[in-house]
Image: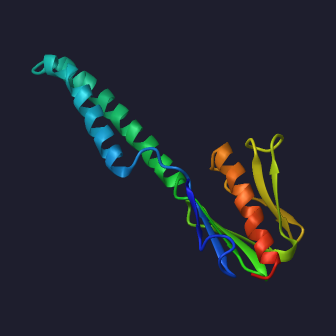
Amino acid sequence: MPYEWTPAPGTAPMTRLRLWPHRSLPKRGFVLFIGVTCAMLLVPLLALLGTGALWGLLPFLMVAVAAVWWAIARSYRSGETHEILSIDPEQAVLVRSNPDGSEQRWQANSYWVEAHIYPKGGPVPHYLTLRGEGREVELGAFLSEPERQTLMIELTSALSHARAGG
């Protein structure tokens, strides 16, 4: 799962949850994909070597490869988002790091923090939120439905343990 608890909920007074988006294409796969795409686009051009048509098609193929490169690189930048939730007996702090380098921060007294999951009606199915200090913030919107459901159970346990005083 694209999140980890350190240390595990219920084992220490301070619990930290780190969440990140799933990566289906690693960097090495990206390089391989671009290389194979270039090779496959060059095969039809072999028949055009020495003709003027080669120079007519080549710019369009280069633009196609550049567009694919740009789209995948942009996807990687958006995947730089991550969230860190720290829970101790006194407070819960959520820090979301955005791809542009900015951070969003939320904190509340751990005793009053509540985790909610909305099966329907949110921006994503099984929308997971934390509520406290008069605000409700989303958590793990980039996770899949089953991951958010499992996280809800673990999060409830971690918050209960923090309320009990560690």
Residue located at (69% from left, 73% from top):
10
Q: Is residue 109 visible?
A: no
Residue located at (34% from left, 44% from top):
29
Q: Quadrant of residue 38?
A: top left
Q: Position of residue 95 (x, y in %)?
A: 66, 70
Identify the image quadrant of the C terminus.
bottom right
Q: Quadrant of residue 106?
A: bottom right
Residue located at (48% from left, 49% from top):
23
Q: Does residue 63 sit above or below 20 in this rendering?
A: above
Give the colour scheme of this rendering. Answer: rainbow
Q: Is residue 102 left or right of residue 42?
A: right
Q: Nearer the viewer, residue 51 or 7?
A: 7
Q: Position of residue 8 (x, y in %)?
A: 62, 70
Residue located at (41% from left, 37% from top):
67
Q: Nearer the viewer, residue 59 or 47?
A: 47
Q: Nearer the viewer, residue 153 or 111?
A: 153
Q: Does residue 12 sit above or below 116 in this rendering?
A: below
